[in-house]
Amino acid sequence: MSSPTSDAAKQKFQPLHRSWQRILSFLFPSENDRWLTVFRTGLGLQVTLYALFLRNDWHNLFGSGGRGLVGRELGEAISSFDSPFIPKLGWLIAAGRNLNMSEEAVLTVAWVALLSTGCLLLLGLLSRPAAIVAWFVHLCVAESGGLLAYGADNFMTTALFYLMLSPLPDRYSFDHWVTKTKPKKSQALGFWRRVLQVHLCFVYFIGGLAKCLGNGWWDGSNLWRSLIRPPFTLVPPDLLVHFKYVLPLLGISICLLEVSYPVFIWLKRTHWIWLGCILAMHASIGLMMGLYLFALVLIVMNVAAFGVPNTSSTAQARSGDTNQ
Amino acid sequence: MPPASAEYARKGELIASWCLGKEANASNPVRLAIAAYLHAAGIQAGYTFFAPNVPNHHQLNLELFYDGDRVEYESPRVHGRAAALRLDSLLDRLADQRYEPIREVIVKRLAFSVWRKHPDVKKVRATFGSINPPGMNEFEQGQTETFQPMFSFDFSVRGEEQQ
């Protein structure tokens, strides 16, 4: 029997307990692994294309001072100033030197490693080791070439970081077919998807808010400037002039779409509209500005986070249990 | 943003800076560990692409001086479009005041990358500047982009001098 005092204490803490349960069910929803399949294959394609797009410039971009464009030493010095624990190509080259490998040979191995891990992720073969190697090599490259990096690199690092920590392999991977591994815990799958979802909400809210502060997004001039800015000039300016009354509307839409993403992407009625608009925006950025890798990584992240419905009946049943 | 929000924004910045260990000594292990984590997760930078406004494009023009007053004009080059985006990103960084201490080193290296392909060049003048695009109405009136020089360096075989 419980004493009246303990009953009173229980009642007092009940709202707190309920809130805690709500937080837990938000952070650890039951999920199937279809989103992870999309995430893995999408990032596999991303890493493969990343390696292929840079194949002719690889040594030029990441070689040392006397051989490369600017030399990777400067980028490495800047990241070492932040923290000496940040991985960089210099580590791999120093390790290669112990094995009597030249700098060129190590850079080639790094490129082959990226390309191979991209293909392995696409197939789902050795999924987790491939994800770890892809994250590590890409991070080394992004940090050593930090001066030459742009937005796509940050998103790739983030996406590969989450992929590496997610409960791989998924059931559509080669690994699952070969080893017949048991399905992963649905709560762990749900947690990592939730992390990705919340991360994207931060990204769009911050990006949207910053855009709202720029007057050029409200009158369309920023869209004009971004589309005629070399090397993004894929659309002839004469053609853009024909749409001069549409640009302000598009500029305002982009601001509102991004800043309101954290709200409307969660609502059932607006979910698919917001997701469709965001995907269309990234596809347009890719096609009209030639930022293919930037567009692809964000499309992959969005589709994995919000574009794969959780239709597993077991997961739904379990989800119902946890919500009760 | 309304002026009243400036004070809150400053306080928020201080709190974020403290949470990220940036107030600690540069060699503080906690600060170093946090920085390493931020880089490893790709969250060390903000998400303000093309915001609040689209910045100007930047260009590095190299004048190559040969014996006998012959002059050629070049720019640092890469092979693929993906690498061109990166080179462009580097040039945009150079315009940022934060990169002022390493500007000369970077420009010198970019000039050297061109010099390697033209070994008989005696002197290189590197001029860095911003390209101001015309507005849409100006474009319709036939105006084109203008180049606004920001700084230049002269590099010679024996040494270099800054202008």
Image: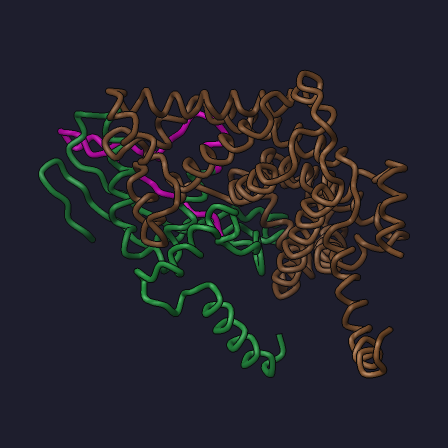
Chain colours: A brown, B green
Please say if A189 is above or below B79: below
Residue at point 40% right, 26% down? A58
Residue at 54% across, 73% down: B12
Question: Is residue A168 depicted above or below A319 in this figure?
Answer: above
Quadrant of the image occupied by residue A2? bottom right
Q: Name which residue lies at 44% across and 56% down.
A: B34
Q: Is residue B60 magenta?
A: yes
Q: Where does the N terminus of chain A fall, quadrant-wise?
A: bottom right
For residue A242, say whether it is visible.
no
Q: Is residue A5 visible?
A: yes
Depth check: give the residue in front, B27 or A317.
Answer: A317
Q: Is residue B73 above or below residue B104?
A: above
Residue A41 in the image, given as x and y percentages of width and height: 66, 28
Q: Quadrant of residue B63?
A: top left
Q: Residue at x 51, y 47 (%)?
A: B42
The quarter of the picture where residue A105 lies is top left
Q: Is residue A199 rendered magenta in the image?
A: no
The residue nearer to you, when weighing B41 against A251, is B41
Task: Name the spot of residue A321 as percent of width and height, x first.
Answer: 88, 50
For residue A54, side relative to residue A287 (left or right): left
The quadrant in which the C terminus of chain A is found is: bottom right
Residue A4 lies, with reference to residue A188, above or below; the image says below
Nearer-the-camera pick, A232 or A5:
A5
Answer left or right for B3 relative to A90.
right
Q: Nearer the viewer, residue B112 or B26?
A: B26
Left or right: where does residue B96 sit relative to residue A259? left
Q: Which residues are magenta?
A: B56-85
